[in-house]
Image (cartoon, rainbow, N blue to C red):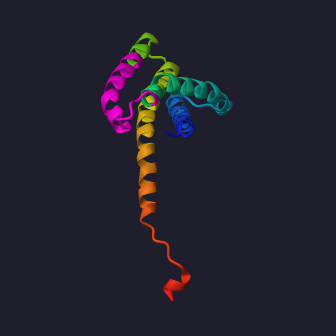
Amino acid sequence: MNLSLTILKSIVLATSIFWLVIISEDFEASMFYLILLSIIPISLCCTIVILSTIAPFFWFKKNSRTNKDIFKKYFPFYAIVSFGLCSYGIYESKFGAYLISFFASAFFTTLQTWVLLVNHNKQKRHITTSTKYIQTTKPEDNI
């Protein structure tokens, strides 16, 4: 599990979703500096949430369970709880644009992080199995 790459992808996704929702409301040229500055708190939030709520499911797995098994067992409950919490946060915020974008980016980023963590090992396994079938030949053999 390449956690640092997954966190980096999640930071890019969360920043994109957050600012796309806000820019759709109103955009000013002076917001460009806010976009760059917002990467710091978004990266802190993503890192803390991934390390405290998603990664432990994969760290504390038993040897007999694969990442796909963990995904199938815990992801639906995680999605339901995170949807409920984000919906409640949006309702309590009186539907403010900044808080809607925060909760929407948090919800979609956490769900995508689960998928990234499960598919990372699948891609790695595919690469290693495909390299087993590459035959090495000497240049003299082809003559």
Farthest residue, direction front: 63
Q: Position of residue 14 (x, y in %)?
A: 52, 32
* 79 inside magenta stretch: yes
Farthest residue, direction top: 92
Q: Residue at x 35, y 29 (%)?
A: 75
- Above or below — where is 139 with respect to 115? below
Q: Position of residue 98 (x, y in %)?
A: 52, 21
Q: Position of residue 72 (x, y in %)?
A: 31, 33
Q: Residue at x 49, y 30 (%)?
A: 21
Which of these two is toward me, 12 or 60? 60
* 45 inside magenta stretch: no
- Above or below — where is 109 with respect to 48? below
Q: How many marks?
A: 0
Q: What secondary structure characterizes most of the magenta part?
A: helix
Farthest residue, direction bottom: 143
Q: Residue at x 52, y 29 (%)?
A: 18
Toward which corner of the image does residue 19 lie, by quadrant? top right
Which of these two is toward me, 29 or 127? 127
- On screen, residue 135 versus residue 46, left or right, reads left
Q: Residue at x 46, y 26 (%)?
A: 56
Q: Position of residue 101 (x, y in %)?
A: 49, 25
Q: Which residues are magenta?
A: 59-86
